[in-house]
Image (tube, rainbow, N blue to C red):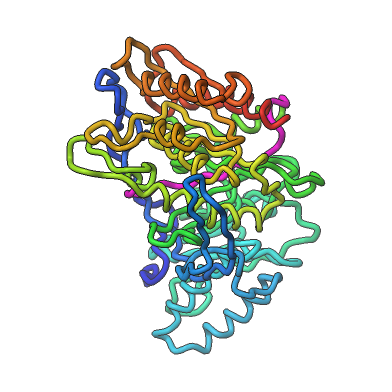
């Protein structure tokens, strides 16, 4: 039987990804290609079924008041469905229900269960005293098993088998000796191909690629994924968010800052598009050297609506009007994603501990988020920001005019670009960033204190350039935050 096609659209060993050409707004002279402003889509791994009950409100820089009191959409939120802390209790009850259910209802029950366990406090795999329960969808014609540190990496150690006949859900219910140290594990296909568990909440990378984790390790950083996140999204599409968790985050005795970043697909994986930002390695190094205090990083995947969500107004770059949904996206971060992260992790939730960063259109929307929610985000960073948006084919206010009309108080700003040349012209949004720097200086921002400007002469508009400047951003942010 094939995998269910109800609420979950997941393939055990990968998702379909589409990526277009790069967009270099004031860079007709910049011939680089990048995922910087290309609409990138990744099929949601899970469609969550739990509704948020969090109620949060904030006053924006434009004077409007926002709240998600009336959010009736589905998604992951602070209400975790009343699931018991012991996931094995939930699993055993589900197993009994599945066995007694009508055959035609079983696939739906299995799909709902997976979604609920994704939403639960621990996530997957299920971990309780003496047991480790790993779940997977069947791949017809392929033998699947589980192995890891706890099984000396024996590929045949723990076969995955149907939980109930004629249902696509497979299970390995593994007896483990306690105390079980947080372990790495993988799923094995056909006895030879080792792959990460796509359902695993916690994961990381090594020289062999992605691995899965049974629990957080106190001595190393890791990542935690939340597919199909939609709490506070309202009319925006659900998307995956990934949290970088620094080593010792849960036993450090203090609450940590958080950096929110856009274009999450390109941030963490060593083999991300166009080389990626290599955020994990940079964060590990910056924390180890003391350039920045340990902090969380939340990567928010983009969607096919990226041009709309990352822009504060409409513009026309040759194919008609596009853009203008940044209010919705900013509120999604401030009123949906951030409350969830603050509820789940030991964060310092104040603006003085919260930053946002992106590149290209992601840089533009980071500045806009800081402008709209200065009481939530105290630091906003823009790399190669598309700051001329609004005036390319139309005559709408740019981000510069918004700041001039109503400058947000106490917002630390980082600006950078590559490129060079005389203005107007240049490449990599160089001229628009110089203009923004000068305007902020006139508005009272203090260079090197509340405003950091970096120019990388000749640098291109791509992930490799942003990755190379990211450690410098972390050093500047660490200084601003007092390390």
Give the residue displayed 50% in from the left and 40% down from the top. 371
320, above or below 400, in the image = below
Horizontal relation, residue 276 to residue 242: left or right: left
Horizontal relation, residue 241 to residue 289: left or right: left
166, above or below 123, in the image = below
Query: How far from the left and from the top, in percent, is residue 360?
Result: 39, 32
Location of the N terminus by quadrant is bottom left
Q: Residue furthest left?
A: 319
Query: How far from the left and from the top, in percent, is residue 255?
Result: 74, 46
Evaluate whether residue 384 shows in this view: yes
181, above or below 123, in the image = above
Near-viewer residue (483 or 276): 483
Location of the C terminus by quadrant is top right
Give the residue displayed 62% in from the left and 81% down from the top. 93
Q: How many marks?
A: 0
Q: Residue furthest front?
A: 405
Report which quarter residue 23 is drawn in.
top left
> Which range of residues does the magenta coloring cover?
289-305
Evaluate whether residue 468 shows in this view: no
Q: Is residue 345 magenta?
A: no
């Amino acid at each position: 039987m094939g995998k269910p096609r109800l609420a979950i659209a997941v393939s055990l060993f990968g998702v379909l990804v589409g990526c277009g050409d790069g967009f270099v707004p004031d860079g007709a002279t910049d011939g680089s290609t990048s995922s910087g402003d290309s609409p990138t889509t990744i099929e949601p791994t899970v469609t969550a079924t739990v509704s948020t009950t969090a109620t949060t409100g904030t006053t924006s820089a434009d004077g409007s008041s926002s709240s998600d009191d009336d959010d009736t959409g589905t998604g992951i939120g602070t209400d975790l469905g009343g699931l018991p802390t012991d996931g094995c209790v939930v699993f055993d009850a589900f197993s009994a229900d599945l066995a007694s259910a009508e055959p035609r209802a079983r696939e739906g029950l299995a799909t709902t269960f997976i979604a609920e366990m994704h939403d639960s406090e621990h996530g997957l795999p299920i971990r309780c005293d003496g047991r480790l329960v790993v779940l997977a969808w069947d791949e017809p014609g392929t033998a699947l098993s589980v192995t890891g540190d706890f099984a000396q990496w024996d590929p045949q150690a723990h076969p995955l088998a149907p939980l109930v006949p004629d249902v696509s859900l497979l299970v390995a219910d593994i007896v483990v000796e306690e105390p079980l140290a947080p372990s790495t594990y993988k799923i094995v296909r056909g006895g030879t191909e080792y792959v990460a568990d796509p359902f695993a909440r916690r994961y990381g990378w090594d020289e062999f690629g992605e691995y899965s984790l049974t629990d957080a390790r106190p001595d190393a950083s890791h990542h935690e994924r939340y597919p199909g996140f939609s709490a506070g999204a309202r009319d925006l599409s659900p998307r995956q968010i990934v949290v970088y968790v620094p080593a010792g985050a849960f036993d450090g005795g203090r609450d940590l800052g958080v950096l929110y970043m856009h274009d999450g697909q390109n941030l963490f994986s060593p083999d991300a598009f166009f080389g990626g930002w290599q955020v994990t390695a940079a964060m590990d190094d910056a924390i180890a050297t003391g350039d920045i205090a340990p902090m969380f990083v939340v990567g928010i995947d983009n969607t096919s609506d990226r041009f709309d969500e990352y822009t504060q107004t409409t513009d026309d770059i040759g194919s008609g009007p596009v853009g203008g949904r940044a209010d919705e996206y900013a509120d999604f971060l401030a009123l949906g994603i951030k409350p969830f992260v603050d509820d789940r992790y030991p964060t310092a939730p104040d603006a003085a501990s919260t930053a946002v960063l992106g590149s290209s259109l992601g840089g533009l929307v980071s500045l806009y988020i800081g402008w709209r929610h200065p009481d939530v985000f105290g630091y906003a960073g823009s790399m190669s920001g598309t700051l001329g948006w609004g005036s390319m084919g139309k005559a709408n206010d740019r981000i510069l005019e918004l700041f001039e009309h109503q400058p947000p108080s106490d917002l630390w700003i980082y600006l950078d670009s590559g490129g060079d040349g005389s203005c107007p012209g240049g490449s990599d949004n160089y001229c628009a960033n110089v203009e923004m720097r000068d305007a902020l200086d006139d508005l009272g921002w203090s260079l090197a204190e509340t405003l950091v400007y970096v120019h990388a002469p000749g640098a291109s508009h791509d992930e490799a350039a942003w990755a190379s400047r990211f450690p410098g951003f972390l050093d500047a942010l660490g200084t601003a935050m007092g390390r």
